[in-house]
Image (cartoon, rainbow, N blue to C red):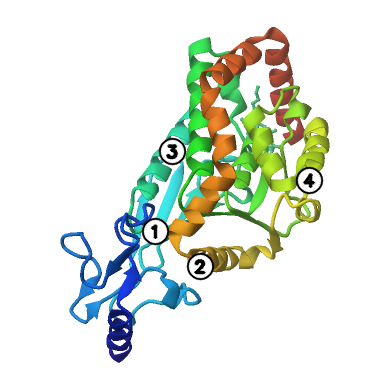
Amino acid sequence: MAAVVTLARRITLSGALPCRMVSPHVPCPLLLVQAGECPMTPCPHTTPFGVLFPRSSPQVWSQAAWQPPGLLSTQRRAFSNNKILVELDTSSGVATMKFKSPPVNSLSLDFLTEFCISLEKLENDRACRGLIITSTIPRVFSSGLDIMEMCGKSTEHYAEFWRAVQEMWLRLYGSNMVTVAAVNGSSPAGGCLIALSCDYRIMAENPKYVIGLNEAQLGIVAPFWFKDTFVNAVGHRVAERSLQLGLLHSVPEAHQIGLVDEVVPEEKLQEKAVAVVAQWLALPDHARQLTKTMMRKAVLDHMLAHREEDIQNFVNFVSKDSIQKSLSMYMEMLKKKKG
Ligand code: CO8
């Protein structure tokens, strides 16, 4: 209690403070408000102990995980659907999203829809500033797009499916939250795209895990925005070679080319992800978010400008007999590998 009062007094005495509370994702339009002059009703900064700023401010940049002892008890909220479980720790502002769609977390239309709904809920939740994405399925983070959604369906279905893939990427790549992929299994193609769309990737050490954009191996071509996202992470030359050869990289190789930022033993993965999010959240949201937008906007805008054309291209491409044949053969190969 004494610590809270001391902090509140220190903040109150410092006068002008950055207001971060209008929305976790939208900086206060005034940016600086005088303590106690917050335009919100009721003012979320005012506590029985004075004016309080639990979110990061210049005074607490190095103490991202700091909470007033006894004032904010650790609170967990969870919501779940058929494919995804989300747990939000409201005291740290970090949600963990766990894929739970056996056998391999493939990105079906249902999965993508639930993923987008979950992302939207978190994005609009003032209590959430950071997101960790991981899997509950042993050895698989996500097997990428559900190939069955691209085989033997109508053109309307292909269009709807592709719009959902685009939507997932737009929401994740353009998210205001700090996003960390805790990659605890293999992550080919669309699975790799999910990881690449996050701000930071940590992968579990395991000689069996692979990650990469392997579309060329299936006889299909990674769309331009998959490519742009990849290039932004690893650079043009590395992306070009990896994409042309449809490479699935081992964990050490993925680390070496910068496809993943860090490799840790599997049992340390969650703990490491939490530490990384805390480190990123220690900066003022508005500065980090505007910087993220500055880095990603061109790629997002380019996709949005060509969205309908991209859907049409996908539908035309995937409807071709030769592509249907390649995809069916690939599915056969996957099933045979098992037997
Ligand atoms: N879609 C649908 N079913 C799948 C997929 C998938 N992506 N991946 C695996 N499955 C199925 C398997 O066929 C198998 O089914 P069944 O039990 O009926 O035989 C079941 O899931 C389990 O698969 P495995 O036995 O292979 O599981 P393992 O744990 O041994 O291996 C792997 C897991 C490593 C994920 C492995 O399944 C694998 O490599 N899968 C293929 C992944 C892949 O190549 N994905 C690419 C999808 S395409 C994509 O994401 C981007 C496309 C961009 C569009 C381009 C424009 C045209």
Spatial CA distance of label 1 from label 3 is 16 Å
What secondary structure is found at the residue carrying circle 4?
strand
Q: Residues within 10 Å of mark 1 (few under 14, many from 20)?
A: many
Q: Earlier in the sequence, mark 2 or mark 3?
A: 3
Q: Earlier in the sequence, mark 1 or mark 3?
A: 1
User: Which residue is label 4 attached to?
Assistant: 249
Q: Give left or right: position of 12 versus 331.
A: left
The mark tally for this picture is 4
Percent x, y of residue 266: 66, 62
Q: Earlier in the sequence, mark 4 or mark 2?
A: 4
Examine the rendering and report whether any part of residue 182 can be seen: no
Q: Is residue 48 above or below residue 281?
A: below
What's the mark number on residue 116? 3
Percent x, y of residue 23: 32, 55
Percent x, y of residue 53: 32, 72
Q: Give the residue drawn at x 65%, y 34%.
A: 226
Q: Earlier in the sequence, mark 1 or mark 4?
A: 1
Q: In this rendered view, identify the residue nearer to me: 123 or 321.
A: 123
Of the residues shown, which amino acid type is indicated by label 4?
Answer: His
